[in-house]
Image (spheres, grey):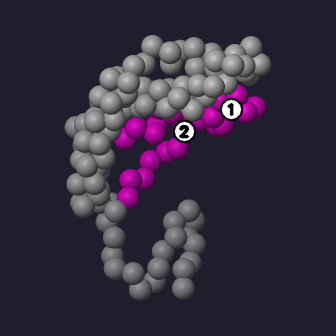
Amino acid sequence: MRRRCGSQAWLPNAPAHRSARSRCPRSRPKAWRIHTTIQQFEAHQAFAWEYRANYDAMPPLLRGRLDESEHFTPADYEEARAIAVRARAALAETFEEVDVFLTFSAPGAAPKGIDWTGDPVLTGCGR
């Protein structure tokens, strides 16, 4: 039987829980910085044909993002992926100590429209 109490769910027969502050792995700042490299390199690869063959027909926002990603090389991407692998391993160690990270999802209300999902500042722990 699960009950809702305010915004917390609880199980009556579950073992006791505790909350504590936890530090994110030291690799987190590097992983945060290289996220853009990975995301933009992969986006450019995924839209490579459209970018070459239908550049003018692409939505301006997407076209602009792809223009920004042209300078990333395969070596940049591989270096970024290596950092991400190390960061994931460090995070796995962190989750041996804690079961969940609880944080705010955004610093304010969601923006209007569909052009942007909002400020991602809180998606990196311990920022």
Q: Position of residue 34 (x, y in %)?
A: 37, 28
What residue range appears in magenta? 100-127
Q: Residue at x 43, y 31 (%)?
A: 38
Q: Is residue 3 left or right of residue 123?
A: right
Q: Nearer the viewer, residue 53 or 111?
A: 53
87 within the magenta span: no
Q: Are marks 2 and 1 in contact (CB under 8 Å)?
A: no
Question: Which of the 4 quarters of the picture holds residue 127?
Answer: top left
| Label ID, residue 111 | 1
| Label ID, residue 106 | 2
Q: Is residue 70 visible?
A: yes
Q: Secondary structure at mark 1?
A: loop
Q: Nearer the viewer, residue 47 or 120?
A: 47
111 within the magenta span: yes
Q: Secondary structure at mark 2?
A: loop
**Quadrant placement of the N terminus:** bottom right
Question: Which of the 4 quarters of the picture holds residue 126?
Answer: top left
Q: Position of residue 81 (x, y in %)?
A: 34, 35
Tell me: residue 93, above or below residue 3.
Answer: above
Packing grade of label 1 (10 A; few <14, some 14-19, many >=20) is few
Tell me: residue 21, above or below residue 71.
Answer: below
Q: Is residue 115 left or right of residue 18?
A: right
Q: Nearer the viewer, residue 19 or 32?
A: 32
Q: Amino acid at mark 2?
A: Ala
Q: Nearer the viewer, residue 79 or 19?
A: 79
Q: Is residue 22 visible?
A: no
| Magenta stretch: dominant secondary structure | loop
Tell me: residue 69, above or below residue 97.
Answer: above
Q: Residue at x 34, y 23 (%)?
A: 76
**Which of marks 1 and 2 precedes in the sequence?**
2
Q: Residue at x 61, y 28 (%)?
A: 47
